[in-house]
Amino acid sequence: MHVVVLGAGVVGVATAHYLALDGHEVTVLDREAAVGRDASGGNAGLIAPGHSYAWASPAAPRMMVRSLLGQRTAIRVKPTLDPALLGWGIRFLRECTADRARRNTLVKHRLCRHSHDCINALAASEAIEYAREAAGVFYLYGDEAALQAGWARTSLLRENGEDLRLLSAMEVADREPAFARATSPIAGAIFGADDASGDCELFTRGLAASLERRGVTFQLGETINGLRVDGGSVTGVRTTNGEVRGDAYVLALGTGSAAIARTAGIRVPVYPAKGYSATFAVRDPGACPRVGGVDEGTLVAWSRLGDRLRMSSTAEFSGYDRSWRPDDFAGIIATARRLFPGAADWDTGAYRACLRPMTPDGPPVIGRSRVGNLWLNTGHGHMGWTMGPGSGQVLADLFAGRPTAIEPDGVAPR
Ligand SMILES: Cc1cc2nc3c(=O)[nH]c(=O)nc-3n(C[C@H](O)[C@H](O)[C@H](O)COP(=O)(O)OP(=O)(O)OC[C@H]3O[C@@H](n4cnc5c(N)ncnc54)[C@H](O)[C@@H]3O)c2cc1C
């Protein structure tokens, strides 16, 4: 069968891989000139089943109200009359009960763990180099009470097989000598022993290169304008270069998914959450962390990508706007100076804003849509580097009609 995959982020390229492995002829389309450039090229680099909590939780509505009142919060909402955001927001609020948060976290966790195995297997089978650091991930706390509250929250993931450990400040410094120079107190950390970090864009590029060698076609630099639907099936993809036809289609356009799905009469509950991403050249390797992490006080995340340090923060619901001002990076730079003084020249980062494709409940949407030959693999939110490769594998299982590697309950189109 000829399958057209729409989108060449980590999700689209991984999907193309598993479909090609099943013997399908695959064409991948993207507007960018290279693969893995959009969210997949700006993320924090953490492969983190140990952090797979759903954002929709009992604590989220209070944070959103504080944000609307003008306070600085990790999740921010810009007051807007965008009906898509209003609809998405109502669905998000419905997911903010303790029961729903627990269920959504476990769906994500299952997929994250499976996907981490897929990342490892793909890196080995396709010989992909992607600046991997396998030494775990720190969830760092400056305050003892917050550390204890964070630790209590881990019980759900620990009960479900996640190796999370409570580390004292001394144990943190033993594992990551870069913290010895931190200028603010560290109370301790929760350490995700099975978590890792690495460059998602490099991984996506490496996988695409091996796919090209196996005959997968990449049509890059082509913007998709919509889908042509006839008699209940998609018959083509309208792009700036004409029409691309296949037997089946997989929509993996990240935050571009909702607009293109609409042209086939399908509603995909994906809305962007903007994040800021800065990449710094490492100046003093001894002062720069090797182990990735999240500063839980500021929700700034980092990972070492070879001779660069990637840092990111903030989730802002402000539509599809990708603009940024230097001031948007002030929190990242302050955290960097405080935790890793001297590691890089913090005034010369490469800055960008990018958009997380968020679903209201948290798990992505994977499976066949109402339009028979249109499949969906989108909505990976804040964890698409971790969940993307496994999602490609699950989609290929569903496409083939064979039992899926993990229980697909919770990711079906909704
Ligand atoms: C600041 C930030 C930090 C993050 N940190 C992490 C992290 O540490 N760990 C983690 O697991 N995840 C993280 N994520 C999430 C992760 O990056 C995303 O979930 C993941 O990259 C989504 O992959 P994707 O392939 O679905 O989307 P994308 O990578 O965005 O790819 C979608 C592709 O579709 C193309 N496209 C869209 N519309 C069109 C169109 N009309 N025509 C043609 N092409 C189109 C785009 O060009 C793009 O290449 C982070 C995200 C952000 C923004």
Image (spheres, rainbow, N blue to C red):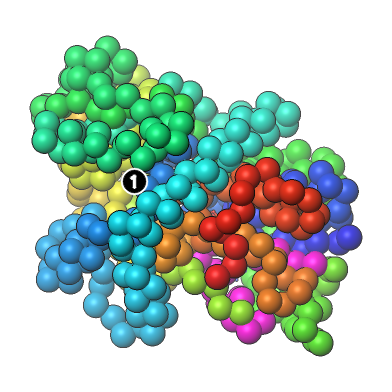
Corner quadrant of residue 398: bottom right
Q: Quadrant of the C terminus?
A: bottom right
Q: Is residue 36 left or right of residue 211?
A: left
Q: Which residues are magenta?
A: 248-265
Residue 142, percent across and down? 14, 33
Q: Is residue 56 visible?
A: yes
Q: Residue at x 22, y 57 (%)?
A: 59
Q: Is residue 82 above or below residue 174?
A: below
Q: Residue furthest top?
A: 174
Q: Nearer the viewer, residue 137 or 103?
A: 103
Q: Is residue 177 above or below residue 259?
A: above
Mark 1 lies within 8 Å of ligand 1 (Cβ measured): yes
Q: Nearer the viewer, residue 129 or 153?
A: 153
Q: Nearer the viewer, residue 302 or 51?
A: 51
Q: Is residue 332 visible?
A: no
Mark 1 secondary-structure assignment: strand
Type of amino acid at the residue the image marks with label 1: Ser
Residue 403, percent across and down? 74, 49
Q: Is residue 237 above or below residue 47?
A: below
Q: Quadrant of the N terminus?
A: bottom right
Q: Is residue 135 above or below residue 9?
A: above
Q: Residue at x 59, y 67 (%)?
A: 413
Q: Residue at x 30, y 56 (%)?
A: 98
Q: Is residue 139 left or right of residue 119?
A: left
Residue to which mark 1 is pinned = 312
